[in-house]
Image (cartoon, coloured by chain):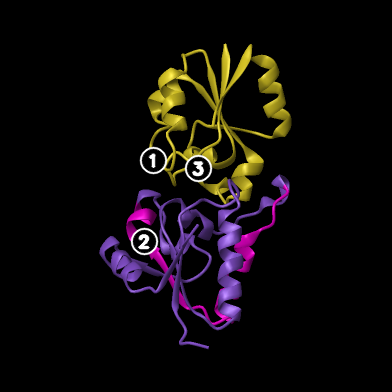
Amino acid sequence: MSDNKSFLIVNRKAPFGSAFAKEALDVGLIAAAFGQKLSLLFMDDGVYQLLKNQNPSDINQKNSSQTLPMLEMYDVKDIYVEAESLQARNLQSEDLLISVQIIDSQATAELIDQQDILLNF
Amino acid sequence: MILHTVNKSPLQNNSLDSCLRIAQPDCAILLIEDAVYAATDTANGLISEQVLSLHKVYALIPDLKARGLLERIKPGIELVNYDGFVTLTEQFDSVQSWY
């Protein structure tokens, strides 16, 4: 097989209102299981996917946020959050349920620029 | 009198803007699904003091709970369950859904 390509999954949607968040995580875990070079970026409403204390039992949905800590088990350590998106939502790193690297828009642009493959959800 | 329901995130969609532009003072606003972010300190200030002085604003508890928002509700917003949702639809002449 050819050299591994670098993948970036860009998460821009809030959880539950659509299936994007769940599907992005599924794709991320599969890519990680196949040993791909994977990074995740959360920006815009996508940062809401990382909020602590999510509990969708009363709306009959699966709690994908509980799967997020599994990313580390799969050796996915490059998880980025755009600072401006957090700020616009009055959120701080303490509000998030996994540890992430918070980067500004310029660094976000560079992150996107460095990738071989971009997957948008 | 109309019950306005909104189900989109205020930061990703203009449904709530449109609702607030059109809603008359005797109308109520019910935030459901992704619109519940507007009921918290995590979204823009669309649900302002002025809005709260003009309208009764409700938010749906199961949607807040799902998104981890129950501890972050803005003061002045009333929380309702599914039963309360049904009661509201009975109280108003019609329901306008902004989605």
Q: How far is the residue under mark 3 from the one under mark 2? A: 19 Å
The answer to which of marks 3 and 1 sits earlier in the sequence is 3
Residue at image mark 1 = B44
Helix, strand or loop status at disc 2: strand
Magenta stretch: includes residue A7: no
User: Looking at the rendered structure, which numbered label has been put on residue A82?
Assistant: 2
Q: Chain of mark 2?
A: A
* Residue A69 visible within the image: no
Asked if badge 2 and badge 1 are on a common chain, one would say no
Helix, strand or loop status at disc 1: loop
Q: Residue A33, percent across and down?
A: 61, 80
Q: Is B67 displayed left or right of B19 in the figure?
A: right
Structural crowding at the residue carrying mark 3, measured as other residues with C-alpha within 10 Å and reported as few (<14), some (14–19) or many (≥20): many
Question: In this rendering, is residue A101 above or below B33?
Answer: below
Q: Which chain is yellow?
A: B
Q: Chain of mark 1?
A: B
Q: How far is the residue under mark 2 from the one under mark 1? A: 17 Å
* Residue A48 visible within the image: yes
Magenta segment boundaries in residue numbering: A60-87
Residue at image mark 3 = B37
Q: Which chain is purple?
A: A
**The C terminus of chain B sits in image quarter:** top right
Q: Amino acid at mark 3?
A: Tyr
